[in-house]
Structure formats: structure tokens, C-alpha cells
Amino acid sequence: MTNEAIKEYITGHIPTASFDETGEWLNILVESKQLKSLATSLNGQPIQLDFLFCLTCVDYETHLTMVYHLTSSKDRTMNIVLKANVDRTTPEIETVCDIWRTAEFHEREVFEMFGVQFLNHPDLRKLILEEDFKGYPLRKDFEDPINMIKL
Amino acid sequence: MYNETEIIKDTTELGPDGELVINMGPQHPATHGVLHLVVTLNGETIKKIEPHLGYIHRSIEKMCERLTYRQFIYVTSRMDYLSSHINNTACALLVEKGMQIEVPERAKVVRTILNELTRIASHELWIGAMAMDLGAFTPFFYAFREREMITDIMEDTCGARLTMNYIVPGGLMYDIHPAFQTNVKAFIKQFKEKVTEYEDLVTGNVIFQSRTKGVGVLTAEDAISYGCTGPVARASGVSCDMRKIAPYDAYDRVEFDEVIETDGDSFTRYLVRVKEMNQSIRIIEQLIDNIPEGEFVGKTKNVLKLAKGEFYQRVETARGELGVYIVSEGGTTPYRIKFRSPGFSNLSVLNHISKGSMIGDLMATMGTLDLVIPDIDR
Amino acid sequence: MLSLESITKTTQDWLLAKFDPTIALAIECVIVILLCITLFAVLGLVLVLLERKVAARIQIRLGPNRVGPGGIFQTAADTLKLIMKEGLTPDTADKFLFNLAPFVVMMVAMLLLAPIAFAKNFQIWDINIGVLYISSVSSLSVIGILMAGWASNNKYSLLGAMRSGAQIVSYELSAGFAVLTIVVLTGSLQISEIVAAQENGWWLFKGHIPVVIAFVLYIIAVTAETNRAPFDLAEAESELTAGFHTEYSGMKFALFFLAEYINIFIVCAIGATLFLGGWMPFHIGSWEAFNHIMDYIPSSIWFMGKTFFLIFLIMWFRWTFPRLRVDQLLNLEWKYLLPISLFNLLLVTVVAIMGWHF
């Protein structure tokens, strides 16, 4: 399926989605509230983006951006990047781990590193850090005076 | 650092239904490093496995945000230390893609050969370690005999035996050792002779087969849903070889087969890896006599600056698909870097496929998932 | 001729001539105890070294080669290290049982030495129910292991001990039936009579296929009973760290370790006695000259040679096979070995009644 067809499909689904084709792959930016429904429909017919190979978050200091790299196991050359901006003070987004189960661990990682709350996540706990760790280490303003971490 | 955390409270007493909760790791002979699994048992049967990571978390992603595009490659050797050349290649390819650096043919071919040697070395170590998990000590030594030759080649080439740093943006750090080709050929000869030895010792062994066949079955749907890649997914019939899907370096000019089996159990994962070693040998054989003469590194600026934008590079490590995602603001350091490690996704499937099996099966499953903990924690 | 038989005879005669019979018996007891302990120590050292050398040979490496010529003092040095280590007792362990367990295991191993015929007429106690004694005493060792696993207050130890319990109790049956086939053929439970019955040929060769089957069953069963790979589920270091002796250190650990090797020696000695003629030399029918040469080799050498051959066999298994899973282990016993041994016993009984054996 070509980028044009995907764009058409997504525009039909969510008219407000904006596209960016400057990079290697098609980038789609949607509202964080619309992401879940778009993800569900992309996973199903006719596009079948059933392989979430990367899930991460980027801290732009004004806002956080959730980044989902999707591909299809039927056609691995079709890759799209799904993005959603979330608020930095109270970051919240619907989980996608019921669509792609690999998201469960990736979201736990994003949760502890960026503090994004994933709504309806079955087991949102810290995965890598200690339970009593304070702060979100991968945010740009994270400071750890003891270990001298400061960007 | 721990203040009576949940992990400690959980395990000093029996679980809610009187199940036995044992802490497997972080110091445990079968977890190959510092993986901590909280295993809930009912007798010998596993009810739940909960991985606790972070014992070797070095926050490489954060570290890389402070390092320049020349420096950050060296950190990635410490991620999946068994495929350090491949990790380095991924980073170098990404920088090359971002800056449109032309890589000389010689460098491309040598990189491919080194990547395949690394893959063989990693699979050799894995055969030994997995056999050890199942209680057979001897295959370890047989596998290490051949692996030793590769480490020697690596030592000649780049000076290190484990955390190799040889691949730089634009090509290679130095030219190859004069004896590189003869050594690699000697290795291929020895490997072909001796590989049958430990295959006899392991593959045909009745106990080994009964321990692994039908154990930890991963269906293709689950493999896709859990984002499994590499031999784990290929054993379940999912085609996911990055060398085929998005060829990099010299992979587009060599002939090899993507090994795909459909059973999805531990034995199939074993078979896939053994066949992959033979495919790697095939790739090396095609390239070793055809290393083009010329420069080993392309022309690059002294200070590397990636254009503003986002870059993603995928390569096939010994464990699966390694993705490097860089958000660049146009500076000398990455604004945000994310390593999509194959082990992380492969580990997430562990609970799903070993629920209801025995502790002994867990060793077989964990062994054949081929977990490298620094790769998972990063 | 200087043989172990003549030495014991002379010693006994001298003691009886010098002392009152009761005191002579007491002195004999002391000598036997000392000899037993010495044998234990020596066997432990030799067998551990042998195991390491055999393992090294199989694994294309050299093995211990630094302490002494060819590394022969390596195990002595290791023992010294273990003696000097602190014998830790975990805080939450049941201290009495925890400390008792290694000695129980050790004592069981020691008791088993009594009826073994090391050479011609060289036996501590030729009890008339020798085989019965062996099979009953050897099953006691599971108590020591269960004790160790339970008292450690460690989940791995407990799992290991439970596995070991299930395993030893099951494989006891097969081993028992394998031993019974020889008892049926010989018609006696006494070790000396069993050996004497093999004067004109070892049971392994005389007894046709049923005895060969029994021999194979015996080797499998005793490998399991001594918790050796591929049946080392009680220890299973990749699953249960070290199983029932996870918490043991220093000399207490060494006692478990030693007991394992002594047990191997004993089961192999019994196997050699029952199936390979004990101290009986190897004779071929009417080859008089050959038989005479064989007779010149001392009986103790014959016995040790056969025993060590079996020990080597068991070590060979260990370094070749992966470990079985616990359910496969029990399946193997209850679904395959036990029915086979029951049927085999029937077959042997028929052979014995009809006199079909040589």
C-alpha cells in the first residue's frame, strides 16, 4: 500500500491528522485522544499495520511526543511513524498494549523514563528503575546531583 | 537504595494462594547475567513470570545525548556485547544516512564479513550457554573452540576480543589486518569440519530433543504481536530478516536464505540458529575473496552534524532487529536517541510462552530466546 | 603370597594370640573404622580428580594441572580450602537438622561399605542378607537430603530436596529389581556367595539377555539414585542454583560432595559384584593358560578395576547428556523402567527355573 493510500485512509478516519513526508517514512501527527482509535483501525483491515517495532517518547521541553513505529508483517517495506503530542505536566495517553502486546513493556519503560501515564494499561509499574525512584530520567530537565547527570 | 520495596516484600512469604514465589536472579546460573525473574510456582509448574530489569541499566540513551556522533558509537558496543560490530554498524549507517556520506566498497564488504563473523560467534556462544542451561556442559567447550578463532580474528582486526569498536561513520577505523583473509578462510575450513561434532552432541541427543521439542511454543500471531524478531520470530514462521527486507552494506549483492521454520518451539529456535550459522558462512565465503581494493574510510568532516530531522536505522543483530532512532536538532549530539533492542521485545514474550510449563522448561525457553541482559536494560 | 586375605588373617591370628578375644574384636573394630575413614578420604580425593580429568578429556581441555605433577594434588588443595572455609549456618535455618544432614548422608554411605567384598575373603561383614541390607540402607540417604533441603529454609533447596525424594524413591524400585535378578539366579542374598557363583563366568555373560537388560537398568537406576547427571535434578545448578545444598559451605558442603562420590563408588562396587563377578578374575572356558595368567592378577585389582570401569561409565554419561526434566524423569521410571524390570524379573525366574543359564 502506498503512502498516498495510507494518507487517504487516515484522512478519512481523522480529518485533523497532519502528515510529514520529509523523512524516510511517512509521519502522521494526531491528537493524543484520537491516537487509540486510529491505531485500532490501522491494525485492522485494510492496512494491517500489525507490527509495532518501536515505541518511544521524545521530550521537546514544551511538550512530549509519543512516537510509534509501525509496519506490517505482510509487507515489511511499508513503514509509518505515528506521533501524538502529550501535555508535559500531566502527560496522559491511551495504552495501545491491547492492540500490540509488545507495547506493554515499552510503555512501562516510557512511563518510568518520561512519566507518561498510560490509561487502561494492565500493569503500569516501573520496569527498570527502583520503585522509589523520583523523577523522570530521560526528560531534558532531569538532574541528579549525586551522579552528576545534567544536560 | 531499596526501602522495603514491593519486590522484597513479595518474596519473603508465600503468594496470595499459597504459591511458591522464587526470585530467579539477579544472581542465578541460568539467567546469564543480571536478569531478575520473579517466578510464581505451583509445585514445579510456573504460574507467572515477572521480569525485573535494571540491574545493568546504564542509561545509554541518556548518555548518548551528551556524546557526539563520533563518540556515541563506542557506547553501543556495550549494549549487546555479543554483536558489538553489528550495533556499531547500525549507528554508523544511521550517521551515514543522515549526512549522506559515501562509504567505500571495501569498507562495506569488510563490515558485512565482520557482521557475519560476529553473528557466528554469538550463536556459538549461545549454543554452549543453552546446552549448559539444559545441564550438558560439554558442547560449551566445543562451541568455544570455534568461537576462539573468531575472537582471534577480531583481536587482529581491531584489538579487542569482546567489545569491538572498529566501525566508524564513513567506513572502518583502520584497514584490515594483512592476514585477515587467510585467517577467515582457516576459520571457515575448521568450522565446516567441526560444526557437525557439536551438532551430533546436541541436535541428535534424545534428551535434548525431549527437553526442547514442544517447549515454549510461540505462535506466529504472538510473535508479531509481541514484536519478536530474529531467530525467535523466524522459528515461528515470521519473516523478519532485516538483511533481506532493507539490505544494508553488502547484503544486497550476496546470496543467502532467510531461515524460516514454522514450529515455534525451543528446538526449532535452536535449529534456526544452527542453520543461520551456515548461512553466515555462505555469505562470508562469497565475500572473502572479493574484498575490493581502495580506501577503507570515506571522506567525512571532522565534526559530524546531522541535519535536523528524524532518522531510523534497522539492522539484523544475532538476536533480531536492532533499531536506532535519532531525533536530531541539527547539533553535534543527538537530541534524543532510542535503541530498539531485540532482546527487550523477546523477553516480553517469556511470561506468555512459559506459563503452565515446568521450571526445567523455563530454562529451555529462556535459553533459546537468547537473552543478553545489557541489551535489554541498555 | 602377599595378599589382602593373608594380611588380615595374620593380623587376626596375632591379635587373638596376644589378647583376650573381646579386646581383639575391639581392636579389630578400631582398625576397620580407621581403614574405612582412610578409604573414604582417599576415594574422595581420587574420584574427584578422576572426574575432573575425565571431564577435561571429554571437553577437549587439560583439567587440573598446576598442583603437583599433572595436578594430582589439586583435590587435596581443594579439600584444604574447604576445611579452612567458614561453615555458615543460615539464620533462619533449623540449625540442628541443618548441621545433622551432611552427617546422615555420610553415615549412610559409610554403612554401605560393610558388606562389600573388596578382595578374596576381604570383607568387613559378610552378612547373609547382604543384598537386602544394601538396598535398605541405601534408601536412607534420601532422609539426609530431605533434611538438608527442608532445614535450609531456602526455596531452591526445598524444591531440590523434593525432587530428590521423588527421584530416589522411584528409582529404588528399578535398582531393587535389577539386583533381584541376580539374587534369583544365585539363590542367595549373601555377597560372598554371589561372587562365588560367578567363578566360572560373570553373570553378565552367563545370564543371557535378561541379565544384560538388568545390568543396563541397574546402571540407569543407580545414576539416578546417586543424583548424577543426566538425573541430577536435585542439584540442577541451572535451575535450582545448587538444589538441596545451596546453603551449605565449607566442610559441610564437602561432606555432601564426598558422600556423592562415595555413593558412586559403592553402587559401582555393588554393580561390579553382582554383574561382573566382584573380585573374580576374568576366565574364558577352557583356556587354561589364559585363566592362569588372569589368576595371577590380585583379586583386589580385579575388583577395583571393574568398579572404576563402571565409575568411568557413569562419569561419561554425566559429561555427555543434558539433564532430564522432572516429569520426564518420573515417566522414564514408572512408564518404562519399572514395567521392563518387572517383566525382566519374570524372564530371569523362568531362566533360573529351567536352568537355561550357563
Image (spheres, grey):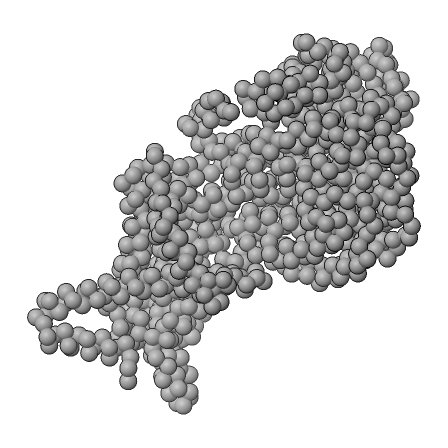
Tally the numbered discs.
0
Tell me, yes or no, if residue B146 can be seen here: yes
- Taking the spot 68% from the left edge, 12% from the top edge, the residue there is A92
> Which residue reaches farthest bottom?
C289
Q: Is residue A136 left or right of residue C223?
A: right
Snapshot quadrant of residue A116: top right
- Please state the horizontal and vertical placement of residue C78, each as a whole percent of the image: 42, 56
- Please state the horizontal and vertical placement of residue A136, each as a whole percent of the image: 64, 18
- Please state the horizontal and vertical placement of residue B232, each as a whole percent of the image: 68, 40
> Which residue reaches farthest left?
C20
- Taking the spot 70% from the left edge, 11% from the top edge, the residue there is A88
Q: Nearer the viewer, residue C95 or B168?
A: B168
Image quarter in which the C terminus of chain B is found = top right
- In the displayed structure, B301 sits above or below C55; it is above
- In the displayed structure, C259 sits above or below B368; it is below
- In the displayed structure, C299 sits above or below C255; it is below
- Taking the spot 40% from the left edge, 72% from the top edge, the residue there is C305
- Taking the spot 31% from the left edge, 71% from the top edge, the residue there is C118
Tell me, yes or no, if residue B253 can be seen here: no
- Please state the horizontal and vertical placement of residue B22, each as a whole percent of the image: 47, 33
- In the displayed structure, B129 sits above or below A31; it is below
Q: Is residue B257 left or right of residue C323?
A: right
Snapshot quadrant of residue B214: top right
